[in-house]
Image (cartoon, rainbow, N blue to C red):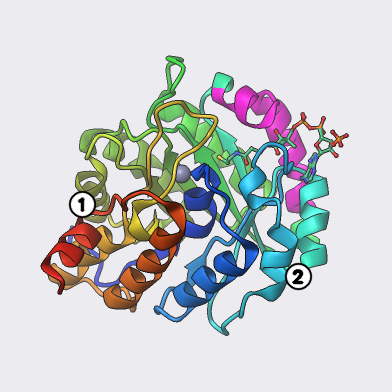
Amino acid sequence: MALPKRVTLCEMGPRDGLQNETRLVSTDDKIAYIDLLSQTGLTEIEVTSFVNPKAIPQLADAAEVFARIERRPGVRYPVLVPNIKGYQRARAAGADAIAVFTAASEEFTRRNINMTIQESLETFRDVVIAAKRDGVHVRGYISTAFGSPFGDEITPHTVTQLARELMTMGCDELSIGDTIGVGVPNQVEEIAAPLLREFGSEAVALHFHDTRGTALANIYAALQLGVHRFDSSAGGLGGCPYAPGATGNVGTEDVLYMLHTMGIHTGIDLAKIRAASRFIASRLGHPIESRVYTALEAANA
Ligand code: COA
Ligand code: ZN
């Protein structure tokens, strides 16, 4: 199959990225970071989470961040919502796109959101029904789809079943996550091909963490299947505090470098992403993981 000519990236830095940072980033800095990302040509930026602030203290300022960012026309700004309370908070702050999140691992789901997978589906059904009534766009995450941090077995069938549940309740798109970065390319085909057949490529995004260095190989495998929607994080920030050993998302710079050099368009300016990463790096107190970011900085290019 010919590779897609154009790819859409959903930027994870402000949410999946910052949620894993121990040093608290000020609200003003988060807003400045998101505003920089809004100027890069990105069309989807996940801004924050309306979860229990005790679960993710870094994102306790979600309402203020959301209310004060500059929302560019043509850019979607989803926020993570775990339940109806989060939905109401998100709507009160002005959100018109949300993401709900379940997982293929029972143990991860329990630790992450204190629910069984079945309970999470019931919780999200109410959220998605409310969102559809309100004209809110909904993405549905399936985390740990490529492997569980707790050793429970994950099969492509489990992922397909969950995807059906999420799409049937009204999600507009799915994001299938390799939360702990264990996935390999043949697995991408096993997991993504049935989803593409059933829901079409507009409805399927893939979300890779680069913990074991397989994220770009997985993206290439996915491109060959016709996947043209991916999540990535500026600078390669990210991880989940509830998934031991999880490191960052694949770096937006790394994905852009590969895609652009292959002649695949994104509409996103790599130099501007790098500027946003450089800004947030100065606030985090540790080096940035993206290979391409690091290479460009070293070359002073
Ligand atoms: N926003 C703010 N506060 C919330 C909330 C929300 N969306 N949902 C629940 N809370 C508060 C409740 O009001 C309650 O507060 P209290 O302690 O002051 O009474 C407290 O959280 C516990 O509520 P409960 O309904 O019993 O939730 P829980 O303890 O079973 O936790 C979640 C469930 C989903 C709220 C929590 O696990 C969570 O927020 N997880 C998110 C984890 C995450 O973001 N992971 C990273 C993404 S991969
Ligand atoms: Zn993630």
Identify the disc placed on residue 220: 1
**Quadrant where the N terminus lies?**
bottom left
- Residue 150 on image: x %, y %: 46, 17
Residue at horizontal 61 percent and vertical 30 percent from the top: 112
**Quadrant where the C terminus lies?**
bottom left
Crowding at mark 2 (Cα within 10 Å: few <14, some 14-19, many 20+): few
- Residue 248 on image: x %, y %: 38, 44
The kind of residue on which mark 1 rests is Tyr
- Whether residue 155 is visible to the viewer of this picture, yes or no, is yes
Question: What is the residue that sits farthest to the bottom in this orientation?
Answer: 73
The verdict on residue 109 being magenta is yes
Placement of 183 over or under 276, stated as above or below: above
Give the secondary structure at mark 2: loop
The verdict on residue 105 being magenta is no
- Residue 130 on image: x %, y %: 81, 55
Q: Which residues are magenta?
A: 108-129
